[in-house]
Image (cartoon, rainbow, N blue to C red):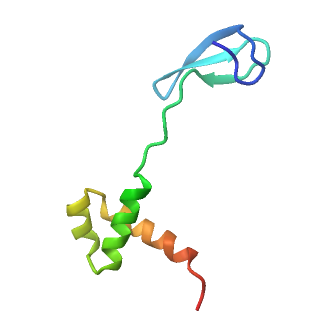
Amino acid sequence: MQCPECGSTHIRKNGIKKGKQNHICVDCKRQFVDRYEAHKGYSDEVKRECLKLYVNGMGFRAIERVKGVHHTTIITWVKQVGERLPDA
């Protein structure tokens, strides 16, 4: 294992944070986790499909039942898209 900052292999364990082993570089004192998990979330395709259903008149809770995405998440996506629209 190497330090992501300086590339040193002089590494020590440094406790556990959020269920993951934390390490510290002895040379530069940088703390890091040995493996990072991929970003969790919905794909752009799922977001696009939910927004398309909303634009076509389906309600938030109906979309939740069909797509399995929580209705408050869909509301957040609609607000984000609305902020990108130019003012008329």
Please say if 69 is above or below 76: above
Residue 50 on image: x %, y %: 34, 66
Q: Give the residue at x 50% y 77%.
A: 82
Residue 61 on image: x %, y %: 24, 69
Please say if 64 is above or below 34: below
Front position in the image: 46 or 8: 46
45 displayed left or right of 71? right
Q: On the rendered image, what quadrant is the N terminus found in? A: top right
Quarter of the image where one finds residue 15:
top right
Q: On the rendered image, what quadrant is the C terminus found in? A: bottom right
Quarter of the image where one finds residue 45:
bottom left
79 displayed left or right of 56? right
Q: Give the residue at x 67% y 10%.
A: 11
Residue 84 on image: x %, y %: 57, 74
Please say if 15 is above or below 75: above
13 displayed left or right of 7? left
Q: Give the residue at x 47% y 72%.
A: 79
53 displayed left or right of 23? left
Q: How many marks?
A: 0
Residue 81 on image: x %, y %: 50, 72
